[in-house]
């Protein structure tokens, strides 16, 4: 665990290094020795520690070429630095961060963020012996900006939101049921001033959410519809509405998934988790913006009550949906979540996050979140924030031809699964039918919410994707 303090002398000196530039504090011969032997040149994320062998107690952290460095270089550098300190069991380090002056307060926040990222672990199911005792590492900043305490507080708070989202996702589906998710959201969010309303099946029936209920029908777990309200500006100001796909498990239903595809499908509520995490981040930091988060929570299972391929179901909007594939269930639950948001919440705009399509992984891998929108300006606003946080996003074309593809073919209004090709876009076009012309951005996080292996400062499995970007976007609105 990294603990961050200020202006406290420590045994180890952490020296920041631009690639190829010797730090002043280092003896020329030592630097030449490192460089010529290719032990360390200061590449982005590269770390070299020497805790006594040469009698120096230093750790060198590389940030890449000065002219190419960005906030992401700083995050990765500090994350790797924290890992190295943890491994070295040295317990404390100090760094003069006037080095980052050109990045201003953003540079300092990125440094703090990188350190805090190293604190995440999901190990609650490991036996005590296996859980290696994590010692505390004290990291002391020298020459941090004047408002350092406030900045530290802010970063710590929004990272709690990221970790909250990760914890919700990493929990297996046998534990993280719709009921459990809704109670966890209520417990955690009510403590920071978000009011959480949980609707049960009868109340969902009353709202007419027939599409959502069709997906929920095959499961023995009760569905829940969660509404998280954070309205510091009062009821007269339109809220920004965040919608999250909340499948606590997706077996595929009768269009059943192969075993390999089913293994990680407890992650199919990552959208809902990132909504909850963002609500936490905003409320904990008392951001002065009205925001409402919503999510339809259920499981997609097989039973005598399940919906079936070939069904034509109703939705809250009145539009009917042809079910060609029960595994395209996310968009069916989102149809009602989006319509509810558009018609009952008076939104300034709606942003939904969903682990919606395997096609998004085929197109953009685990690197990029895929986006579809009916308002390019809204997308640009998000992209701008995401560039700062280092979360990659790519806008896909909402072409007229793709709109055609989701029109019903068996007597219904729309169809939940189209032929081969552009699966992420057609899923988005399906959703567009339920936003009632409101400003809307869809983020397909199938590839970015849950990683097969760790990537930079992101852990394997749940990432809490988009929490930092949405937090930033809404902060700067
Ligand atoms: N939850 C899945 C998408 C997914 C796949 C998320 C892999 C994360 C990793 C979604 O419900 C799904 O099954 N989508 C289908 C849609 C298809 C039937 C039109 C898919 O992608 O195969
Ligand atoms: Mn599915
Ligand atoms: Zn799914």
Image (spheres, rainbow, N blue to C red):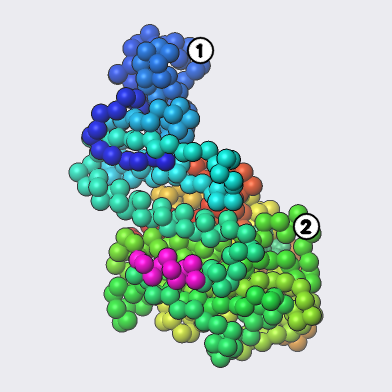
Q: Main secondary structure of the magenta part?
A: helix
- Residue drawn at the location 39% of the way across and 75% of the way down: 195
Asked if residue 143 lies left or right of residue 358, the reply is left
- Residue drawn at the location 68% of the way across and 66% of the way down: 250
Dot 1 falls on a residue whose secondary structure is: loop
User: Which residue is more in the foreground, 9 or 382?
Assistant: 9
User: Which residue is more in the foreground, 385 or 252?
Assistant: 252
Q: Which mark is residue 37?
A: 1
- What is the quadrant of the N terminus in the image? top left
- Magenta region, residue range: 183-192
Furthest residue toward left:
146
- Residue drawn at the location 54% of the way across and 64% of the way down: 271
- Nearer mark to the viewer, of 1 and 2: 2
Dot 2 falls on a residue whose secondary structure is: helix
Residue 67 screen position, x and y as percent: 39, 32
The yes-or-no answer for disc 2 within 8 Å of ligand 1 is no
The yes-or-no answer for disc 1 within 8 Å of ligand 1 is no
Quickly name the residue at label 2: 259
User: Which residue is more in the foreground, 186 or 25?
Assistant: 186
Q: Is residue 263 visible?
A: yes
Q: Is residue 86 above or below residue 467?
A: above
- Residue drawn at the location 30% of the way across and 73% of the way down: 232
């Amino acid at each position: 665990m990294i603990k961050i303090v200020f202006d406290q002398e420590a045994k180890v000196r952490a020296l920041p290094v631009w690639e190829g530039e010797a730090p002043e504090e280092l003896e020329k011969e030592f630097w030449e020795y490192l460089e010529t032997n290719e032990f360390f040149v200061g590449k982005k994320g590269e770390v070299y520690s020497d805790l006594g062998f040469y009698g120096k107690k230093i750790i060198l952290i590389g940030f890449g070429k000065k002219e190419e460095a960005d906030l992401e270089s700083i995050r990765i550098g500090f994350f790797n630095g924290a890992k190295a300190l943890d491994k070295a069991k040295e317990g404390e380090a100090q760094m003069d961060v006037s080095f980052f002056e050109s990045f201003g307060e953003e540079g300092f926040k990125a440094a703090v963020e990188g350190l805090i990222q190293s604190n995440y672990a999901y190990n609650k199911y490991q036996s005590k012996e296996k859980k290696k005792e994590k010692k505390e590492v004290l990291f002391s900043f020298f020459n941090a900006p004047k408002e350092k305490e406030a900045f530290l507080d802010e970063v710590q708070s929004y990272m709690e939101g990221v970790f909250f989202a990760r914890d919700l996702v990493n929990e297996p589906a046998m534990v993280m049921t719709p009921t459990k998710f809704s109670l966890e959201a209520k417990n955690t969010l009510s403590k920071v001033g978000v009011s959480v309303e949980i609707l049960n099946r009868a109340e969902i029936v009353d709202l007419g959410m027939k599409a959502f209920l069709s997906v929920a029908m095959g499961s023995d777990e009760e569905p829940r519809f969660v509404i998280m309200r954070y309205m510091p500006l009062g009821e007269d100001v339109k809220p920004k509405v965040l919608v999250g796909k909340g499948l606590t498990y997706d077996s595929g239903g009768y269009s059943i998934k192969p075993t390999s595809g089913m293994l990680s499908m407890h992650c199919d509520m990552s959208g809902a988790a990132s909504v909850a995490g963002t609500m936490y981040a905003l409320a904990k930091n008392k951001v002065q913006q009205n925001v409402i988060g919503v999510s339809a929570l259920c499981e997609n299972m097989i039973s005598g009550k399940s919906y079936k391929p070939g069904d034509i179901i109703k939705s809250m909007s009145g539009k009917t949906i042809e079910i060609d594939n029960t595994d395209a269930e996310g968009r069916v639950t989102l149809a009602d979540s989006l319509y509810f948001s558009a018609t009952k919440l008076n939104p300034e705009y709606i942003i939904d996050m969903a682990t919606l399509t395997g096609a998004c992984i085929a197109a953009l891998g685990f690197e990029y979140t895929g986006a579809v929108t009916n308002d390019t300006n809204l997308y640009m606003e998000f992209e701008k924030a995401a560039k700062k946080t280092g979360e990659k996003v790519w806008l896909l074309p909402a072409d007229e031809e793709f709109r055609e593809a989701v029109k019903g073919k068996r007597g219904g209004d729309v169809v939940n699964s189209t032929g081969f090709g552009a699966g992420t876009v057609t899923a988005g076009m399906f959703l567009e039918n339920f936003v009632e012309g409101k400003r809307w951005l869809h983020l397909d996080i199938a590839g970015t919410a849950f990683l097969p292996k760790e990537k930079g400062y992101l852990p394997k499995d749940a990432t809490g994707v988009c929490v930092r970007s949405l937090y930033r976007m809404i902060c700067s609105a």
